[in-house]
Image: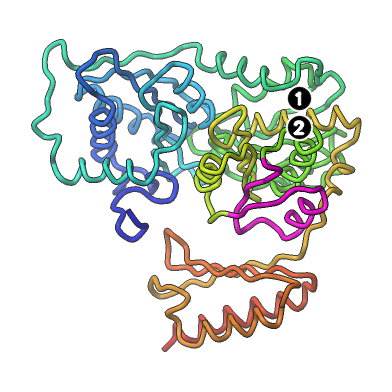
Amino acid sequence: MTQSTRKLFGTDGVRGVANIHPMTTEIAMQIGRAIAFLVKDRTKGHHIVIGKDTRLSGYMIENALAAGICSMGVNVQILGPMPTPGIAFITTSMRADAGVVISASHNPFQDNGIKIFSRDGFKLPDAKEAEIEELIFSQKMEALRPVADEVGKASRIEDSKGRYIVFLKNTFPRKYTLDDFHIVLDCAHGATYKVAPHVFTELGARVTTIGVEPDGKNINHKCGALHPEIMAEKVKQVGADIGLALDGDGDRLIVCDERGHVVDGDHIMAICAKNLLKSRRLRKKTLVTTVMSNMGLEEAMRIMGGQMVRTQVGDRYVVETMRSKGYNFGGEQSGHLVFLDHNTTGDGILAALQLLSVMIKKHKPLSELARVMTTYPQVLENVRMSSKILPEQIQGFPEALTEAENQLGNNGRILVRPSGTEPVIRIMVEGEDEKEISTIALELSDVIRHADRY
């Protein structure tokens, strides 16, 4: 199933404006029925867990999903607001047949989405998503209507947050505490607002919180990982040792040092990869990241005696590569950090604990640890088109791109990719000379704009 042939699923589940196709209660119910159909066999005792973030629309989608699952004779266990990685953890620890996340991650509150974990805690592969779409649009499930005592029932797991908190604390070395740390924690008014403060305070930290008052509409709004400047300013105001900013569903982490300087996912990966390399716990001495990660990270890995493997954009592709090649650490510049020895997906709280443990082990502030890599200048241009088109189909663009790549040589790189959700072509130019790469990015975007006018 390619991106162009998908009817519902995108690169990270189903996503859109809530109550508008495909994020309607009707589609949610059909997705629930299809998931239940795939996990059900002749044995009894099947159950699927459902969790969500703090969006207003989560209530209606949660009920629709639960209704669809129960209508196929499978039981539902409802977790309520819970981080995406927490739902992956509960899915495996409860031996559930699947886990469903209702969240649009870092998107604004009016959007929502549905992501599905298989029983092993990993996101469904494309083939399974294709099966779900086929079941929904082929009407194959219409005749399957369990009745009487064969329908499923729904119940609520009241202690799911406590279970996840205990799991997270157990990933932090027992010989360490956070007694000496003052942490600014921004939960983006999202799914981590109850869990995250408990984790860090129970480990001994003094925590100043931001974004822990969700009202259904303020998730990700001028806070969290998308707006780390809020956290950074607070760190400077209160004199904290570190700032931690999570996104709405808790699978992403951006931090700032004690001086209020923002530290992105690339730097966090460099710090943690170096620690794993030195303790011989980085499998095959390899870090997995995407084409968006900075050249400086690749250079840092080479200097440290490791290597870096790149995938296409998307944390699911990072995880797929890690699993297929036997690697155990990877992530994205945007803050999705996957410690496969601990959890099956990106986990912002877990990643923060791993970073803090390195700070304790090295007896160094984050500002010093972050010097492990030097960031090369990077320029991004988003060119909106009148319709969707591939970059190679634009008149004159392939030639312009080749010329620009020859100009940069080995001193930089260019990444051009179409958006998967809108008629936009994204251009990223990276290199040693910021003026040069800015000029190249502008020239390439002008070629696209000029061609789109004719």
Where does residue 243 sit, x and y in percent of width and height?
Answer: 76, 36
- Using a 10 Å C-alpha cutoff, classify the residue at mark 2 as few (fewer than 14 neighbours), some (14 to 19) or many (20 or more): many
Per the rendering, the mark at residue 355 is none
**Residue 25: x, y in percent?**
27, 37
Which sits in the foreground, 163 or 234? 163
Q: State left or right for residue 122 relative to residue 336.
A: left
Q: Is residue 302 magenta?
A: yes
- Quarter holding the C terminus is bottom left
Asked whether residue 223 is in view, the answer is no
* 244 vs 293, nearest the viewer: 293
Image location of residue 251, percent across then percent down: 57, 37
Residue 123 higher or lower than 432, as above or below: above
Q: For the point 37% across and 29% down, which residue is it?
A: 59
Where is residue 15 drawn, in percent x and y? Answer: 39, 46
Q: Nearer the viewer, residue 311 or 90?
A: 311
* 99, above or below 251, in the image: above
Q: Which amino acid does the dot numbered 2 rest on?
A: Val
Within the image, what quadrant is residue 364 found in? top right
Q: Are marks 2 and 1 in contact (CB under 8 Å)?
A: yes
Q: Amino acid at mark 1?
A: Val
Earlier in the chain: of badge 2 and badge 1, it is 2
Which residue corresponds to mark 2?
Answer: 184
Residue closer to the observer: 429 or 44: 44
Q: Residues under labels 2 and 1: Cα distance?
A: 6 Å
Question: In percent of the image, x 54 and y 67: which residue is there?
Answer: 426
The label on residue 207 is 1
Magenta part of the protein: which range? Answer: 284-310
Say whether residue 118 is visible: yes
